Amino acid sequence: MSENSIPDVEQAINKLTSFHDGDAGVLDGSACGERAIPALRALLFERDPSGLFQSRRRAVEALAKLKAHAVVIDYLETERAANDPVERLGDDAVINAAAQALAEVRDERIFQLLMRLAQRRSLTGVIRALGAFRRPEALPLLIDALEDDASRQQAKAALTTIGRAARPALIAAVKLRLPSSEQESESSLRRRRSALAVLQEIGISQRMWPELRGLIEDPDAKISVLACGLCLMGAPAMEHRNAVHRLLHLIPNVDWMLRDEIEDCLKRSDTTREIIRDHIRKMTGRDIRRSRTGEL
């Protein structure tokens, strides 16, 4: 590239902050090379009470293209405490972009930084970046993120990617009812349901099943269905009967979405067919007896 064709830094920044040419500004900013880093840094660190974040997120993209990781790390390490919720939402969007920009840089300092950020709040970009390291030290934070509506999918994807190494922590998570077994919170239920769903993706060994057996009778129908599904996938065949009977018992009392999941579970094991036929015969006989005695 000739000297005359190198974009001017000020023009590149103006383009980067414009509504229409912002994406082109990212390319121009990175094309300026190291000359653009001070201006990009200044833009990244600007406060914006309006909550607009697009320009700062583009600054992150340009800095990442320039491999100016130190600037992005510095931004994430800088404490910011916006009291206004609108400004805070904009800051969160930039933090997410900055965390994801560092996700491919396998550096211990970055991993520890992401761990600290995740301890504060389960932001989607932070959880996704943390999961990209596939480090067992992150398992507690990834499991905690299962309780958060915004970051749950990123946490589930990260845990699934970690795979078998995550199974002990996931099993512990599905057995933990908070604040108590008698009065479990909605966030605790969300965590346990999600952890079971991840275990279904990863799979379990037969020796792990006894730790999960009691969940078949869990009072939460969703958890019970997921546990039955795990039984039909990973438990010894002799235990399938209890899971099938539990699923058949749940069918009349759940919504159509969970009913579809139950049907999918029942299709997973060849042993279910005879059990279902017996169940239908018993139910049919019971209905006939009721009709004869005038109960219907």
Image: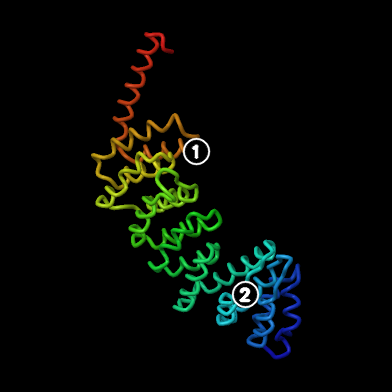
Amino acid under disc 2: Val
Amino acid under disc 1: Met
For this view, does 165 lie left or right of residue 206?
right
Helix, strand or loop at mark 1: helix
* Residue at image coords 40%, 40%: 225
Residue 141 in the image, given as x and y percentages of width and height: 45, 63
* Frontmost residue, 42 versus 268: 42
* Frontmost residue, 176 versus 160: 176
| 193 up-or-down from 103: above or below | above
Residue 93, quarter of picture = bottom right
Between the residue at mark 1 and the residue at mark 2, the CA separation in whole angstroms equals 41 Å
Helix, strand or loop at mark 2: helix
Is the residue marked by circle 1 packed among few (<14), some (14-19), or many (20+) residues within 10 Å? Answer: few
Residue 90 in the image, given as x and y percentages of width and height: 66, 65
* Residue at image coords 36%, 50%: 175
For this view, does 169 lie left or right of residue 1?
left
Question: Which residue bears the numbered disc 1?
Answer: 257
For this view, does 20 lie left or right of residue 57?
right
Question: Which residue bears the numbered disc 2?
Answer: 60
- Quadrant into which the C terminus falls: top left
